[in-house]
Image (spheres, rainbow, N blue to C red):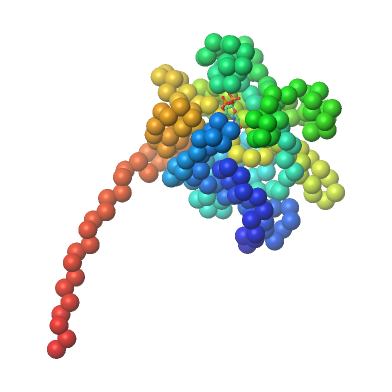
């Protein structure tokens, strides 16, 4: 699939056109941002890890019937995806209270929720992604009842699947954010899961130590973000035991002696 012109550049990804109007190429950058873009850095290798982890999760979700935008991973940093019209809402699912929820409502950090809690935020950086209700979505036509009914069902199934998948490798899925889009094909429109699912968009805590294995390492200056993302990838079986963890040794090239021309 030939890469065409850039059609969008976001905080962590770039989208390129292809010769097929229904498909685009999604490129994962190494850029990290937090606190509504106020904190920024380039973290070498993050894009590669997110590409692999997101591919793994979306492939598994598609096998349990959650339709999503992934067609295939093309290389270390890129995926071929279905071109969708993104619904301008961030869908957040929480199993343990932390982050903005605890600050907003004064809930104690780490409170385990009896049931998964779904929150909706308007996807608008300028407004700081404010919390909204379903009624706001319907009143301002950001989505409609039919779409949200389907999405809510999807959110519970995605959460059930991911909680189990991460529990199996000793990780607690604390919360995550997903996005959905409208895919138009052959005159039909369907709502599918879009965007990435990776340690950039989930909170993942080690089951025993509660060590943070996600973007909070960047948000809260905890250090070694790449080590944590590699740990997630390794536990999911995406990275092999020893790969990418040994520093590459550079040996000095031997001096070459040139013979004098006779
Ligand atoms: N999240 C995200 N992108 C955003 C906001 C949140 O991926 O723009 C994810 C975040 O990584 C966490 C979950 O959504 O896994 C809930 O985030 P929260 O609302 O607590 O946001 P924060 O504390 O980061 O403001």
Quadrant of res 63: top right
Which image quarter: residue 153?
A: top right
Whether residue 190 sits left or right of residue 193 in the image: it is: right
Quadrant location, the C terminus:
bottom left
In screen coordinates, is 234 left or right of 54? left
Residue 121, above or below 43: above
Residue 76 placement (x, y as % from top left): 50, 50
Residue 33 horizontal/vertical position (percent): 53, 37
As drawn, 57 above or below 160: below
Of residues 220 and 49, which is closer to you in this image? Answer: 220
> How many labels were placed on the picture?
0
| Residue found at the far bottom of this picture | 262
- Indicate the quadrant containing the N terminus: top left, top right, bottom left or bottom right: bottom right
Q: Position of residue 96 (x, y in %)?
A: 56, 17
Residue pictured at 72% horizontal, 58% vertical: 20
Q: Is residue 144 left or right of residue 236?
A: right
Inspect this view and state whether residue 52 appears. no
Residue at position x 18%, y 67% in the image = 255
Q: Can you tell me which quadrant of the image ligand 1 is in?
A: top right
Between 47 and 135, the one nearer to me in the picture:
135
Q: For the point 19% across and 70% down, which residue is it?
A: 256
Residue 101: % across, % down: 60, 18
User: Can the viewer see residue 84?
Assistant: yes
- Residue at image position (44%, 20%) is 210
In this view of the protein, which residue sits in the foreground, 187 or 222?
A: 222
């Amino acid at each position: 699939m030939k890469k065409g012109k850039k059609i969008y550049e976001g905080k962590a990804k770039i989208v390129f056109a292809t010769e097929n109007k229904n498909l685009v190429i999604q490129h994962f950058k190494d850029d990290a941002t937090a606190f509504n873009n106020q904190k920024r850095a380039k973290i070498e290798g993050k894009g590669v890890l997110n590409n692999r982890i997101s591919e793994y999760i979306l492939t598994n979700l598609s096998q349990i019937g959650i339709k999503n935008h992934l067609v295939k991973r093309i290389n270390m940093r890129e995926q071929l995806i279905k071109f969708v019209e993104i619904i301008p809402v961030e869908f957040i699912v929480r199993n343990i209270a932390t982050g903005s929820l605890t600050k907003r409502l004064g809930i104690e950090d780490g409170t385990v929720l009896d049931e998964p809690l779904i929150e909706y935020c308007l996807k608008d950086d300028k407004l700081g992604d404010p919390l909204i209700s379903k009624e706001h979505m319907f009143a301002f036509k950001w989505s409609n009842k039919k779409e949200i009914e389907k999405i809510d069902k999807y959110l519970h199934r995605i959460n059930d699947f991911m909680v189990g998948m991460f529990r199996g490798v000793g990780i607690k899925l604390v919360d995550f954010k997903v996005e959905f889009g409208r895919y138009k094909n052959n005159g039909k429109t369907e709502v599918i899961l879009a965007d990435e699912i990776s340690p950039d968009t989930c909170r993942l805590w080690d089951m025993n130590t509660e060590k943070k294995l996600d973007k909070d390492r960047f948000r809260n200056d905890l250090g070694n973000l790449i080590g944590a993302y590699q740990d997630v990838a390794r536990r999911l079986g995406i990275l092999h035991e020893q790969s990418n963890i040994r520093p590459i040794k550079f040996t000095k090239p031997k001096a070459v002696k040139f013979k004098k021309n006779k």
